[in-house]
């Protein structure tokens, strides 16, 4: 197996407190990393680096772990820019817009869906994302959900069955019948292609009993649970996720004190999705409140054509800092190690011996520039599993 020495790293973020300055970010200066195959095998001072088969000098730039985007919806067709424009002139966001994308997705061929997914995955990679989760949820028939997941599984192991995204129009008079479909034949067809099961627990989508039924059925079929909750208002979703011991609960825009306590006690990761508040012109949740209570926090894009059509983790970091009151260090941790935790992954989200060699070289002297220079394409190059991406 050939080895590569990445050296000349002006500032290295390892997310490994055993490395560097001992902070959560494990910051080191004038650092180097040795990669063998897909893995990091050595991290330390450039002056002390061992020899390797090849050397790559990054010229004093900062290097951070590849971003882990733990929440996206990339198997879709169609465009909802008109809906976005209407929102920006005052029309509120509602869960019902999902049905527009469902119609376009059902009408698309497998090839069109796969090409659209590949385009967005490339977009993500260019912006430094090296691990991403993505969901079904725009098919809402047995066939369309199963094909969405089969297509997604070609590009990521982190696939989520979201048949319980919204009740489709043809079941408008029989939501209970739709939940039976999701927990029965749809789950059976989708489980082989999915790692996770999810539901949209929100007024206008699924209530707590329905979400619980979907999650329990999915977990019974061998999937792991995660949940969309408390996006449009306070509700039972966050506490349901904590009670079920789910790995992550996503959105968390409207939280009661009891929700915050439940998150802190359960250890369920609160995934914040600032692209949604940006794109729906909604109030941002206050991350300080979560950190002060001792909650675990991740930041992700929620990239989807309705509520957050950005694939950019750097944008989400900048928004988390400016609008959710995270420090730049907290936001970067949430977008890397936090996302990894939200996916139950210990192999990604850090740069340490044994971890996957996912490295993002920034055209900047420090990681702070991710928030300090919003909207600027700072990703100079990406190594994904040791390979230039
Ligand atoms: O995570 N909240 C539910 N689902 C998506 C929105 C989907 C859409 O509007 O198409 C989300 O925001
Ligand atoms: Fe979502």
Image (spheres, rainbow, N blue to C red):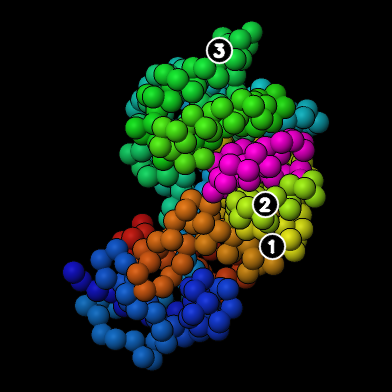
Please say if 270 is above or below 379: above
Q: Quadrant of residue 306?
A: top right
Q: CA distance from mark 3 to mark 2?
A: 32 Å
Disc 1 on helix, strand or loop?
Answer: loop
Q: Measuring from the top left, give residue 204's x and y in whole percent.
A: 70, 24
Q: Quadrant of residue 384?
A: bottom left
On whether residue 121 falls in the magenta region, the answer is no
For the residue pair 317 and 250, the one nearer the viewer reads as 250
The residue that label 3 is drawn on is 177
Ligand 1 quadrant? top right
Q: Measuring from the top left, give residue 299's x and y in whole percent.
A: 60, 54
Please say if 275 is above or below 193: below
Residue 108 appearing in the image? no
Q: CA distance from mark 3 to mark 1?
A: 40 Å
Residue at 51% across, 26% down: 163
For the residue pair 285 and 384, the one nearer the viewer reads as 285
Q: CA distance from mark 1 to mark 2?
A: 9 Å
Please say if 29 is above or below 38: below
Label 3 neighbour load within 10 Å: few <14, some 14-19, many 20+: few
Q: Which of disc 2 and disc 3 is earlier in sequence?
A: 3
Disc 2 on helix, strand or loop?
Answer: helix
The mark found on residue 171 in the picture is: none
For the residue pair 175 and 287, the one nearer the viewer reads as 175
Ligand 2: does it lie within 8 Å of the C-beta at label 1? no
The residue that label 2 is drawn on is 263
Residue at 44% across, 56% down: 345
Residue stretch rendered in magenta on the structure: 226-255
| Direction from residue 160 to residue 213 in the image, left or right | right
Residue at 44% across, 83% down: 31
The residue that label 1 is drawn on is 294
Residue 289 appearing in the image? yes
Ligand 1: does it lie within 8 Å of the C-beta at label 3? no
């Amino acid at each position: 197996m050939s080895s590569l020495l990445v050296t000349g790293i002006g500032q290295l973020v390892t997310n490994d407190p055993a490395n560097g300055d001992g902070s959560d970010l494990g910051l080191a200066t004038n650092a180097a990393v040795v990669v063998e195959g897909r893995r990091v095998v050595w991290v330390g001072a450039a002056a002390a680096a061992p020899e390797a088969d090849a050397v790559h000098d990054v010229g004093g730039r900062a290097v951070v772990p590849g971003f882990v985007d733990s929440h996206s919806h990339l198997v879709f067709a169609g465009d909802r820019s008109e809906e976005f424009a209407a929102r920006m002139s005052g029309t509120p966001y509602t869960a019902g817009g999902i049905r527009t994308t469902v119609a376009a997705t059902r009408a698309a061929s497998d090839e069109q869906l796969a090409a659209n997914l590949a385009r967005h995955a490339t977009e993500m990679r260019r912006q430094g994302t090296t691990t991403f989760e993505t969901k079904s949820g725009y098919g809402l028939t047995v066939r369309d959900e199963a094909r969405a997941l089969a297509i997604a599984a070609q590009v990521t192991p982190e696939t989520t069955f979201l048949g319980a995204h919204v009740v489709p129009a043809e079941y408008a008079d029989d939501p209970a019948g739709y939940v039976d479909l999701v927990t029965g034949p749809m789950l059976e067809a989708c489980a082989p292609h999915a790692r996770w099961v999810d539901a949209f627990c929100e007024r206008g989508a699924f209530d707590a009993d329905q979400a619980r039924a979907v999650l329990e059925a999915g977990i019974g079929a061998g999937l792991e649970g995660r949940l969309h909750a408390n996006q449009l208002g306070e509700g039972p979703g966050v506490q349901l996720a904590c009670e079920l011991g789910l790995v992550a609960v996503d959105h968390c825009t409207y939280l009661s004190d009891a929700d915050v306590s439940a998150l802190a006690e359960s250890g369920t990761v609160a995934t914040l999705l600032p692209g949604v508040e940006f794109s729906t012109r909604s109030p941002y949740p206050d991350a300080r409140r979560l950190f002060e209570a001792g909650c675990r926090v991740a930041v992700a894009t929620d990239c989807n054509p309705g509520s957050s059509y950005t694939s950019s983790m750097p944008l989400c970091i900048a928004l988390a800092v400016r609008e959710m009151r995270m420090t730049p260090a907290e936001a970067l941790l949430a977008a890397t190690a936090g996302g990894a935790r939200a996916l139950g992954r210990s192999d990604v989200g850090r740069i340490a011996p044994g971890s996957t060699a996912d490295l993002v070289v920034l055209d900047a002297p420090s990681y702070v520039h991710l928030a300090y220079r919003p909207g600027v394409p700072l990703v100079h190059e990406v190594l994904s599993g040791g390979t230039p991406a």
